[in-house]
């Protein structure tokens, strides 16, 4: 219930933007681990309205599912979210959007009493690291599992699975 109120408030703050729902099959308020990306994608949560590995079928979600399968992590074992919760139809993110997102993220963390670990996926999400560390959370960082990273920088892509596997240890 608290997470739904959080989403409702985000939607009130920016009525011209879309705020996707949390995956209803995920851990929600019981989450111990959260995976945090930059913002909803133009082919995933930004379109279908839910941040979910099973509801989204864009290439990043497919890559994430493949890595979860590789390390034995269930798709619904972690909370998935974005530093910038508002979807504006664009892939890019401004500094102001990130700063607003960090304020919203701190509010979200306060609603997750069991949260212990946050995995920051990609350089933009990693801007949340100082705030999350200040809140006493265990923070892991990894490259983004985008098709670009996978195809252009396979060495960097190979770094993802070992980091993600640490999240549930």
Image (tube, rainbow, N blue to C red):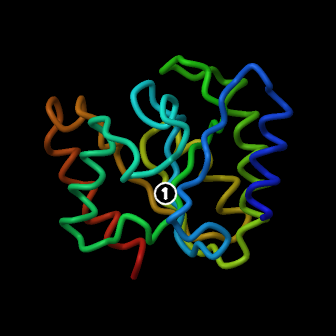
Pinpoint residue 76: horizontal percent, then vertical percent: 43, 67
Above or below: residue 19 compared with residue 81: above
Residue 18 sits in which quadrant? top right
What is the quadrant of the N terminus in the image? bottom right
Q: Which residue is drawn at 56% across and 71% down?
A: 27
Label 1 Cα crowd, 10 Å radius (few <14 / some 14-19 / many 20+): some
The local secondary structure at tag 1 comes to strand
Residue 99 in picture, x, y percent from top left? 73, 34
Q: Is residue 94 above or below residue 6?
A: above
Which sits in the foreground, 107 or 20? 20
Q: Which of 1 and 167 is in front in this view?
A: 1
10 relative to 91, above or below: below
Identify which residue is drawn at 79% across, 39% down. Answer: 10
**Which quadrant does the C terminus fall into?**
bottom left
Residue indicated by mark 1? 35
Q: In this view, does 103 lie to the left or right of 144?
A: right
Q: In this view, does 128 lie to the left or right of 63?
A: right
Q: Which residue is drawn at 40% across and 47% down?
A: 55
Q: Where is residue 161 in the image (x, y as percent from the top left)?
A: 25, 61
Q: Which quarter of the figure has residue 156? A: top left
């Amino acid at each position: 219930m608290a997470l739904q109120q959080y989403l409702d408030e985000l939607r009130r703050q920016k009525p011209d933007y879309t705020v996707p729902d949390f995956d209803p099959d995920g851990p929600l308020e019981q989450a111990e681990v959260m995976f945090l990306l930059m913002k909803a994608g133009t082919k995933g949560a930004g379109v279908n309205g839910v941040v979910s590995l099973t509801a989204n079928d864009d290439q990043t979600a497919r890559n994430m599912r493949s890595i979860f399968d590789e390390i034995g992590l269930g798709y619904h074992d972690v909370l998935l979210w974005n530093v910038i919760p508002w979807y504006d139809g664009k892939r890019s993110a401004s500094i102001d959007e990130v700063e607003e997102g960090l304020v919203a993220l701190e509010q979200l963390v306060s609603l997750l009493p069991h949260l212990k670990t946050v995995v920051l996926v990609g350089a933009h999400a990693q801007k949340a690291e100082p705030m999350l560390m200040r809140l006493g959370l265990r923070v892991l960082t990894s490259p983004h599992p985008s098709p670009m990273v996978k195809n252009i920088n396979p060495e960097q892509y190979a770094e993802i699975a070992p980091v993600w596997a640490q999240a549930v240890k």
